[in-house]
Image (cartoon, helix red, strand yellow):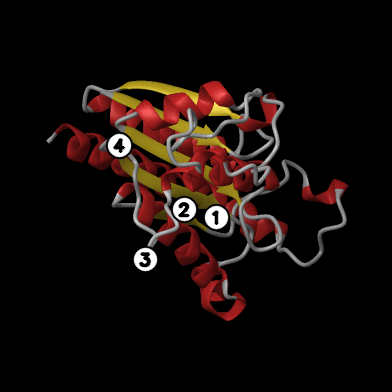
Amino acid sequence: MKALAVNGSPRKKWNTAMLLERALAGAESKGARCEMVHLYDLAYTGCRSCFSCKLLNGKNYGRCAVRDGLTPALERAAESDVLILGSPVYFGTETGMMRSFMERLLFPFVTYTPGYASIFPGRLRSALVYSMNIGEEALAATGQDRRIEHSRSFMTRTFGNCETLVVCDTFQFQDYSKYLSTVWDAEAKAKRREGVFPRDLERAFGLGARLAEAAGA
């Protein structure tokens, strides 16, 4: 069983990456072979609207025809048993690198048929992991919950399932005094980092374990 985590954050050792690492540890506890891909290490673009993936009887039907730095990651994602995508929230949605990855991953499998049926040939368990500055109480007020559900629906349409893990009020800077960031209470952020984020990491572990267990069932 193979588990792949895709990090859509430019930071390899901070909130999103830490959550993904714990999710992979959970999958590993259930016997999965685990790998992490850092999108900011790769050179690629989003979908180019060439429609080769939609061309009937074409050599690239059902797969992205573009060959660049993302191609190996797309192939490993499609072959995985557990796929976990993680991203911080930038301007209300996933990072640009993650959005481009999702375009290239999902669009080839979604058909222009009634209901937009999926032709994904595999069987995997998927999840989206988000980290963000805002607190839980602001998810509905800002519309963030609806945007997350929108992305989850595309993953579910493609793969038949998708869980979400939303981690709010994260600790962004090691030293808040160095940055103009007065909208946040640095002391409260630090306190939450110590008291709540460890529980978020355990939720990530449970997510990975649960997905791997379901994939192996």
Q: Is residue 67 left or right of residue 23?
A: right
The alpha-carbon separation of the residues under discs 1 and 2 comes to 5 Å
Q: Which residue is mark 4?
A: 121
Q: Which residue is mark 3?
A: 114
Determine the residue positioned at 25% across, 34% down.
212
Considering only order in the chain, which callout, 4 or 1, is on the residue closer to the N terminus? 4
Please identify the quarter of the rendering in which residue 52 is found: top right
The alpha-carbon separation of the residues under discs 4 and 2 comes to 39 Å
Pick the front one: 180 or 31: 31
Q: Is residue 32 left or right of residue 197?
A: left
The alpha-carbon separation of the residues under discs 3 and 4 comes to 19 Å
Amino acid type at circle 3 is: Pro
Determine the residue positioned at 69% across, 55% down.
90
Q: Which residue is mark 2?
A: 196
CB within 8 Å, label 3 to label 4: no
Q: Label 3: how many residues lie within 10 Å, few (<14), some (14-19) or many (20+)?
A: few
Q: Secondary structure at mark 3?
A: loop
Q: Is residue 213 left or right of residue 11?
A: left
Q: Label 4: how many residues lie within 10 Å, few (<14), some (14-19) or many (20+)?
A: few
CB within 8 Å, label 1 to label 2: yes
CB within 8 Å, label 4 to label 2: no
